[in-house]
Amino acid sequence: MLMKEVNLVFQVFFLLVTLLFLIYFLTGYDSAFEADQNCHSYLASYDNSSGNYGCDHDTETHQWILYESNENKEPAKIIKKFRYKFL
């Protein structure tokens, strides 16, 4: 009885790990260049005459971020993230 429970827990754990890997590798852009191009493509669709919109590369999380800043020294508002695959 205990062996069946251990086996079931292992199978569920293995399934979750497999799903996470599939989600990671099947979503996101293939390269930083593709993420950069898409970020700047979205940026072009905004009225940026005030210069409040921009794209920034976050090397720690491997993504480009489209953001809106303001003049009040408040944190920027993140509009969209463009994650690319690290491996």
Image: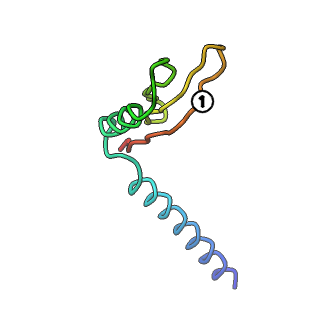
Above/below status of 30 relative to 59: below
Horizontal and vertical percent for residue 75? Answer: 64, 22
- Left or right: where 8 falls relative to 47: right
Residue at the image position 58 percent from the left and 71 percent from the top:
12
| Circle 1: residue type | Lys
Decide which of 86, 73 is in the foreground and name it: 73
Which image quadrant for residue 74? top right
Above/below status of 84 relative to 75: below
Which image quadrant for residue 64? top left
Residue at the image position 50 percent from the left and 39 percent from the top:
80
Residue hosting label 1: 77
Horizontal and vertical percent for residue 24? Answer: 44, 53
Residue at the image position 60 percent from the left and 30 percent from the top:
77
- Left or right: where 23 falls relative to 16: left
Horizontal and vertical percent for residue 87? Answer: 35, 44
Residue at the image position 30 percent from the left and 35 percent from the top:
33
Q: Quadrant of the N terminus?
A: bottom right
Kindly state the secondary structure of the residue where label 1 is placed: strand
Residue farthest along the bottom direction in this orientation: 1
